[in-house]
Image: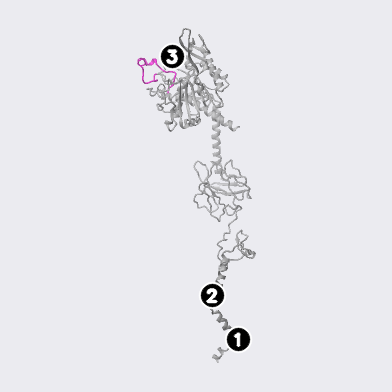
Amino acid sequence: MADATKYVPIGGGNVATDLKSLSFILKTKKTVAAAYAFILAFVAFTVFLAFSPSPNASSPWFTNIFSPASTTDGSYKPQIPNIFSLLFPNSSDPLHNNTNSSRSPYPNTTTESQTLKETSLENRTQTTLVNSTQDAVPVPTTNQTTDSHAPSLEVKFPPPLASKEPPGVVKNQTFNSGEAKPMSTNQTTNATATATNVSVSFPVQNVPNQNTSSNSSVKVDSVKGVVVSNDNYTASLARKQSNGKKDHAKGSDESMESLMKCDFFDGEWVKDDAYPLYKPDSCSLIDEQFNCIRNGRPDKDYQKYKWKPKDCTLPRLDAHRMLQLLRGKRLVFVGDSLNRNMWESLICILRNAVKNKHNVFEANGRVHFRGEAAYSFIFKDYHFSVELFVSPFLVQEGEMTDKNGTKKETLRLDLVGKSSSQYKDADILVFNTGHWWTHDKTSKGQDYYQEGSHVYAELNVLEAFRRALTTWSKWVDANINPSKTMVFFRGYSASHFSGGQWNSGGQCDSETDPIDNEKYLTEYPDKMKVLEKVLKNMKTHVTYQNITRMTDFRKDGHPSIYRKQNLSPEERKSPLRFQDCSHWCLPGVPDLWNEVLYAELLLREYQNQHEQKHR
């Protein structure tokens, strides 16, 4: 019965037949292959949809399903879960799990979820990284111009140093200005932003010569472009530095204003071991006549004095600065051997500051500076010259033949020196005269002074001096352009002959200290009073360097018997009879004349700068 039962057909014979037919069909190879292909295609399509939902599909239905939707926390997720969220409900979405991310209002601004983007090292700048809890705010930097119409704003800083600081903080900001702010006073900022006052904290890198706090919190106004320090110490430090700059400029201005009001020539000599301005016997250009140390002078204190006016302090002559002041110019001395004294002094001072001494040379290769009518020292590296034109009277020396056919020397009071045409276009002119007017012929004034074809049988020396200076002054007014050329007239340099004059046994070899009591000074020379009157009547401004009183103190500064090494037989017999108490040892007194000249050039530069500011 059991065996019979298991062979009984279920539901009738037709059904059994159909099932056998279907089983036969399924067992065919083609059918099996098609089934597997369908299953694989379905799985692949499902995986594709799970991992690559594209909102750009053409089907609206497709787009609505897979396009991201904003959530309440600001993140973006698909409207249907992907396959992994179905299979693994507790896993995180690797693409959209950052619940703290925020969208920057500016496409080019980097947020916390992004890495810091650096620009080229050449610009040494980087994109600002801001905190994820706030909108990105552009921080203005030095020389940055922000345009409100720009579609995106990017703030650039120097690249940061390696840091363990958390994201959202810009490390080691470098300021280009001396103050604790990353923008210049000339910056133009027109940007407008939704947040007007957003604080961005970033430590500031310590940079040499920049007094900036290393941990300064800076408040940035994105609209005004104003950076305000929240750190009292940094703000105080910035104010101190700013005030320091202002104080320095103010001090410089006050110093210049003080010099402008000061009488440089009313003062006293003060001992100062910082002098002389160059080492004794270090300048091979000094004539033997002025090189007292080489000629055996034993005492040295006469070199260690500076001139101190009563109402101001003369700036020490900075040779490097003076080289720059003279760059591209012609400085010309015109006068007698006392101007040669000053000329050689200045050449030695300036040459001492030049790196390549071979680039300082006399234009014609001369090494001795007596006997020629003109000399010119070229400072090749600075494209300027310091020149000397020998003209002891500033007017022409000549000669004429008298009735007896005898030639005699004359002084043409009505003609300026022949070399005048060679220096009229100079940038700086320093004139002097005086000493030769004390010689026998000029002091006596007999058959010597000439005007036109007339020679005066006798003419007072002061009147002759006045006429000569008037001739000179008219030439200056007619030929000198005061807007281009500075004109100086250096006054009479005091002599200190004792017991006679320069040609009658006058001496000064025993003098080793300056005069310390004004009552021993000589009276102001009448010739200089004449000079002052002439200068007042001139159209051209001439700066009078009244050195007479300041030199009168210095009876110790002359070469005296130390004026040469090789004495003549007559000089060996009576060396004390042949002394030089008119000229000056170098280094020595003429160096201070040049220090006054330097102060005058600084004043002129200062005045020119202020005139340009007020135009």
Q: Residue furthest bottom?
A: 1
The reply to whether the magenta stretch includes residue 571 is yes
Dot 1 alpha-carbon crowd within 10 angstroms: few under 14, some 14 to 19, many 20 or more:
few
Secondary structure, mark 1, is: helix
N-terminal-most mark, 1 or 3: 1
Q: In the image, residue 433 lies at what x, y percent?
A: 49, 18
Give me the residue at 58% from left, 85% from top: 17
Secondary structure, mark 3, is: loop
- Quarter of the picture containing the N terminus is bottom right
**Label placed on residue 501:** 3
Q: Residue furthest top?
A: 404
Q: Which residues are magenta?
A: 561-585
> How far is the residue under mark 2 from the one under mark 1?
29 Å
In this rendered view, identify the residue nearer to me: 222 or 143.
143
Check the image and report above or below for 608 versus 583. below
The reply to whether the magenta stretch includes residue 94 is no
N-terminal-most mark, 3 or 2: 2
Q: In the image, residue 5 lies at what x, y percent?
A: 56, 90
Q: Mark 2 against mark 1, which lies toward the viewer?
A: 2
The answer to whether mark 3 and mark 2 are in CB contact below 8 A is no
Main secondary structure along the magenta-highlighted residues? loop
Secondary structure, mark 2, is: helix
Q: Mark 3 against mark 2, which lies toward the viewer?
A: 2
Q: Mark 1 against mark 3, which lies toward the viewer?
A: 1
**Label placed on residue 33:** 2
Q: In the image, residue 594 lies at what x, y percent?
A: 48, 25
Which three-letter amino acid code belongs to the residue tagged 2? Ala
The residue that disc 1 covers is 14
Check the image and report above or below for 442 versus 216. above
> How far is the residue under mark 1 from the one under mark 3?
164 Å
Which three-letter amino acid code belongs to the residue tagged 1? Asn
In this rendered view, identify the residue nearer to me: 449 or 87.
449
